[in-house]
Amino acid sequence: MQSVVILGANGQDGSFLCEIEAAAGRRVLAVGRQPAYAWEQPEGDFQYHQLDVFDQRALRIFLDEHKPQLIFHVAAVHGAAGFAYEPVVEQLFGVAVVSVHTCLEYLRQRGSGQLFYASSAKVFGAQLNGDIDESTPRRADCLYGTAKIAAGNLIDCYRRDHQANALVAYLFNHESTRRPPEFFVPTIARALAAGLAGEHSKENIKTLDFHADWGCAREYMELVSRAMQISLNEDLVIATGSTVYAADAVSELFAAHGLDYRDYLDVAVKAEQDVPAPFSADIGKLASKVGGIPVTGFRRLVENIAGAPA
């Protein structure tokens, strides 16, 4: 039976990977900082282990003891837009970069195995422009993006110098009911649910004046699992390939249910007269190499989270 380790099992992506990998009949070793697994335990060969990947020695001992063939690294120090990374920069780089080195060294000394690393669209800058694919230059505008770029460079070194087998996925916005409530999509979903229930409370958001590519977190992790099973050893953009302007998307979403979003959302920063230029995530490589693309777009995503009818 193939053995997989999932670092960051209590997060949104990690929890979906636990379910997907266990359902596929693999032995799942779930790792998280918390004393217990945060979600309903998947059926199958599943074990939860409390371990902070910031503790590099403990992580290496764990890997040497359990000898996994696959490592899914989805652990991160991560917050919603506006989160201050400066006070936690040591933990940020310890989790996002140094623990990756621990995993790569384990694989190098083992002589086999594969690593998945969850990177982010933030490596392409805060303001995304034009067509974005795996060859787009990396440019960090925040500490989070800087850490993700550093991890990607580290993986490139191990691919080149030690023939490491590692998949790096640049994940665009992907959401679910498991995303913390302060994030944008859960906030919009709460506002929609309130409107459908006839409530009159308002949610606060900073702005709707931006473009984004939003998809379903479970679908993204299913594609990640598939890519690992075909041993894809390269970089990969995972997105829907459909960019929406938030102001238009939210307005159309509420209107589809006979509602005016302005009755349920208090927007702090009003949209500029000139709409910012859109971008486009190129998912051609995802489709050709993995054989699938995400199918759930922004509207259905928010409706699913809000429990709204299609």
Image (cartoon, rainbow, N blue to C red):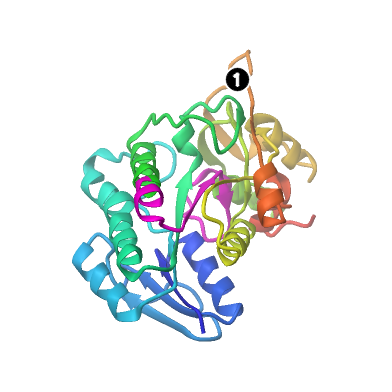
Is disc 1 surrounded by few (<14), some (14 to 19) or many (20+) residues within 10 Å? some
Residue 240 in view: no
- Secondary structure, mark 1, is loop
Residue 173 in which image quadrant: top right
Residue occupying the far top of the picture: 273
For this rendering, which residue is in front, 308 or 291? 291
Magenta-drawn stretch contains 170: yes
Residue 3: image x %, image y %?
46, 78
Write the residue at 28% across / 71% down.
51
Residue that mark 1 sits on? 276
Q: Residue at x 58, y 16 (%)?
A: 272
Compared with 259, 166 (above or below) is: below
Pick the quarter of the image with the C terminus: bottom right
Q: Based on the picture, tell me whether residue 62 belongs to the magenta stretch.
A: no
Of residues 251 and 200, the one drawn nearer to the viewer in this rendering: 251
Residue 62, horizontal then vertical, whole percent:
28, 75
Residues drawn in magenta: 157-185
